[in-house]
Image (tube, grey):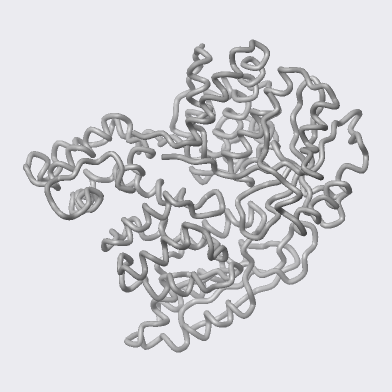
Amino acid sequence: MMTLGMLIWDYQSENQNLIRQWADGIRLGKRDRALLDQKLDALEALEFDLATHTHLVAGPLRSSKDKHIYKLRVNAGVMIRIMLCRGPLNGEAACTLLEGATERDGRLVPANAPEVAAKRREDVLGKPVDCRRKHERFS
Amino acid sequence: MSDSVDEQRRTAELKESFRDQDVREGYAEGFLNTWIASQLTAIRLNRGLTQKELAEAIGTKQPGVARMERENYGKWNLQTLARAAAKLGCRLKVSLETYGTLVEEAAAFRSPGFLLRPDFAHDPFFAPSFGRWPGLDSPGPVGYMRRQMFEWIQKGAPLVQLRDWLAGRDLPAVGDDQPPSYWLIEALRGCPAEEDRQVTLRFQTLLTNLGRSGRLRDEDLELLEVVTGHPIPAAYQEPLQAALDRTPFQDKSSAATERLLRALKDNQINSSAKPIWFDCLGADRERVVDLGLLGLARDSSNPDAFELMGGLEFIQENRPGFETPQKCIRRLLQLRKEFVGNNLVVGLTLESFRSDRWESYRAACVGELFWIEAWDPRLDTLYQKIRYYSENRVAA
């Protein structure tokens, strides 16, 4: 019997899934949504180290002060870069999607996505029940 | 074999979403890329090869292999992949498939272990005749279980099935008050080394992958309860120990920890390992404990016990790191593997954190204690020093 290797959470605020809202806001196509779902499935299955090694996940980002923020890289029709962190609760085999972003000409849009993600990580650490929910698929 | 709820749910979700052409094509493209890059990486690491070593073997350079191991690369060359596969002891398979098989593969893909393939020397199909297993034709429970194992080998020795069996699922009772998994373990014991090598390797792989996701799951615990309930053959000690070392026990409320505590209380754990398990449960996650060594230190009949405990306390006080960069961990594990059974503890110590670099390595042997510190990870130097101390200790 096999089960999911790692839990994935979405950041939420006032019971709104901000990751899902971001995906809806940038109007990802069906193919891109499927690609994004697949990458998150892979992240669930692979060890974080292996995901980093294969460049599915990059980081920790230098632009984030506390070095806890990584970015999921999905080269679809849009260069999708989702800011995430491991855990962040002690000892849990999980990662939390904190802020959605895209990349244009090598620059993140929005540019302050790592800082926003770092702030949200602190929110999750403070109120994990209120600030995250189980990941909802995009397609 | 029973599917888990997660697998069933995932299968249903994918099946529904794949009715859309864009979705299934997008998912298939991503899955292929993930599969190639991750499998190449996982098997290369499994074989203990560096990117440079693999590159030299397939006529390219290290950055070429690094590119092949990136899942966004998307420009793999079939000839190069075939050469890499050959070097890794496998064949390359390219096949046009239905989308239905993608649903099955994606739903079952739940751990890096799913990507691993044995090399030719360990290919179950070419294993020596299992017909020579003693007792294969006997009517008793051991003979029955050996026949089950024989069929399992013929089917390609799927780890998922072995895990289910050892966890007590899908094996019929064999007319005894012992659980079927007990007889399965007994069937693994006492076979000539050559005959049961394939089974041993698969079982080692299973144990090695325990807790890889960073936590010990319920089914892992079920398996540990079974294997620790019997005197464990030496070949399984090392991967089991590695799994335990990896396991953070700080989540006292988890079902896994509850099960472990219950196994301890119910005397299902090998008595010599019992104090060590208790110690792990109460330990800070940042401790690195060599369980075999700790057992020696607690053994009052061991004349080196006092000095050994001093060395262990030093290691614990200096809080060797738990989470380390991937490269350091891999090399550390190689180091520990080489010196396993040599009463050695090696830990990584975080002196000051700069980026992702660990700046100090420390090691202890029975009756001796030494460490080096370096501004850069220099395991080669440590390796030489450990070898020196280790050989001298053995000579003494």
* The C terminus of chain B: image quadrant: bottom left
Residue shown at 56% from the left, 67% from the top: B384
Instruction: Say if residue B393 shows up in the picture.
Output: yes
Determine the image quadrant of residue B391: bottom left
* The N terminus of chain B: image quadrant: top left
Q: Which residue is nearer to you in this view: B63 or A74?
A: A74
Residue A32 in percent (x, y) is at: 74, 21
Up the image or down, A73 lies above or below B323; here it is: above
Residue A58 in percent (x, y) is at: 75, 42
Using residue B177 as the reference point, say whether residue B96 is left or right of it.
Answer: right
Using residue A108 as the reference point, say whether residue B54 is left or right of it.
Answer: left
Instruction: Say if residue B115 shows up in the picture.
Output: no
Residue shown at 46% from the left, 48% from the top: B209
Up the image or down, B152 lies above or below B391; here it is: above
Using residue B208 as the reference point, say whether residue B374 is left or right of it.
Answer: right
Q: Which residue is nearer to you in this view: B244 or B1?
A: B1
Using residue B335 as the reference point, say whether residue A118 is left or right of it.
Answer: right
Tell how many labels.
0
Up the image or down, A53 lies above or below B13; here it is: below
Residue shown at 58% from the left, 77% from the top: B315
Residue A62 in percent (x, y) is at: 85, 50
